[in-house]
Amino acid sequence: MDTCQMRLTTLFLFVITILVLCSFGAAASMHIRSHQHNKGSMNERTEDGSFRSRGKDHYAGEHHEDFDHEAILGSVKEAEEFDKLPTKESKRRLGILLTKMDLNNDKYIERNELKAWILRSFSMLSAEESEDRLEDADTDEDGRVSWNEILQDTYGTNPEDLAVDDKLITDDKQTFEEADIDKDGYLDTEEFKAFTHPEETPRMFPLLLKQALDDKDTDKDGFISFQEFIGNRGIAEDKEWLLAEKNKFDYEHDKNGDGRLDSDEILSWLVPSNEEIASNEVTHLFAASDDDLDNRLSFDEILDHHDAFVGSEATDYGDHLQDIERFTDEF
């Protein structure tokens, strides 16, 4: 085998190796970062009946980097696109975002600027989720959804399923009617967002309060006691669980300490605080990237830690392609 043939063989093996690595990396990335906009995500509740916060599982066990990326980009689709970018391009695009995030144009991102950006991202994420769901439910593709379209999309047409989910259907119908602000029997994009995310829509709060009282206020006094709060959940639980729930009720939910939840306390329990979640995310991102501990982030600090903000598991894909180009240039 002459020198030219040896070099061509080496190039062929190198390319095959890189393609295998890229395929494996892409498959791993798809497995790690699968995002589903399905019916289960709408109006998702915790066991006690409150709405699940966007960051509920963010720090539970292994840290979920996708939450950080979505909190900066305001889009699951954008986050997935960034996952496929080479490091250089990812940093370039992040740099553009930083100029928009930097409200006072001083080339630093203060805590309040980052928090405002994250709150904006949360709203954009909810809108994206709602738009995806509307597209799924809108069977006649007229850009809006009727109650029948939602009913079929969510519960199907099986009479047995509809009977089992009767209470859920009733609540959803009430939510639909409240979201339909112009009372035309259809939900447009904004109305549908109120339907899918009533916990983020203040005009929907009175209905959420009414539904919570209907579900839990068994003595109809307008308040929720601890016994009403736990309801049937306490039947099969042990003493340790009951003590933990009582402690949570007394010190987290019952803010005025009168032994029951009034309207404001019920809403505080039901509706997750995006302000608190955003503040926690700011603290986390500052801890990850404020290298000089001056309580502000320079553009360079953020770009040096870009993987905490928009980084990806698949970044190496683009780098591998660049390696191939450099290698082939030698021939």
Image: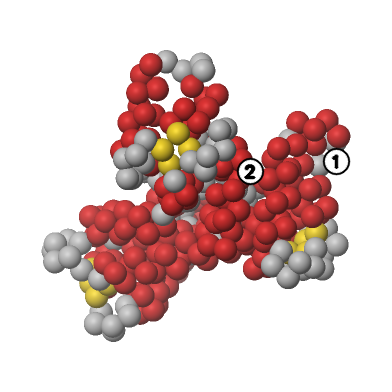
Q: Could you tell which of marks 2 and 1 lies nearer the N-terminus?
A: 2
The numbered mark at residue 87 is none
Frontmost residue, 91 versus 291: 291
Residue at position x 17%, y 61% from top? 291
Q: x%, y% of residue 304?
A: 27, 64
Task: Decide: is 54 above or below 89.
Answer: above
Type of residue at label 1? Thr
Residue at position x 52%, y 43% from top? 222
Q: Mark 2 to mark 1: distance in Å?
A: 17 Å
Residue closest to the far front: 221
Q: Are marks 2 and 1 in contact (CB under 8 Å)?
A: no
Type of residue at label 2? Gly
Frontmost residue, 280 versus 106: 280
Frontmost residue, 306 versus 197: 197
- Pointer 1 local density, CA inside 10 Å: few below 14, some 14–19, many at least 20: few
User: What color scheme is it?
Assistant: secondary structure
Q: x%, y% of residue 140?
A: 85, 62
Q: Quick one: SS at disc 2?
A: helix
Q: x%, y% of residue 173?
A: 73, 50
Residue closest to the far bottom: 105
Can residue 109 be seen at all in this image of the molecule?
yes
- Pointer 2 local density, CA inside 10 Å: few below 14, some 14–19, many at least 20: few
Can residue 5 be seen at all in this image of the molecule?
no
- Give the side of residue 121 with respect to residue 107, left or right: right
Q: Which residue is mark 1?
A: 157
The numbered mark at residue 40 is 2
Residue at position x 38%, y 42% from top? 253
- Give the side of residue 65 with respect to residue 223, left or right: left
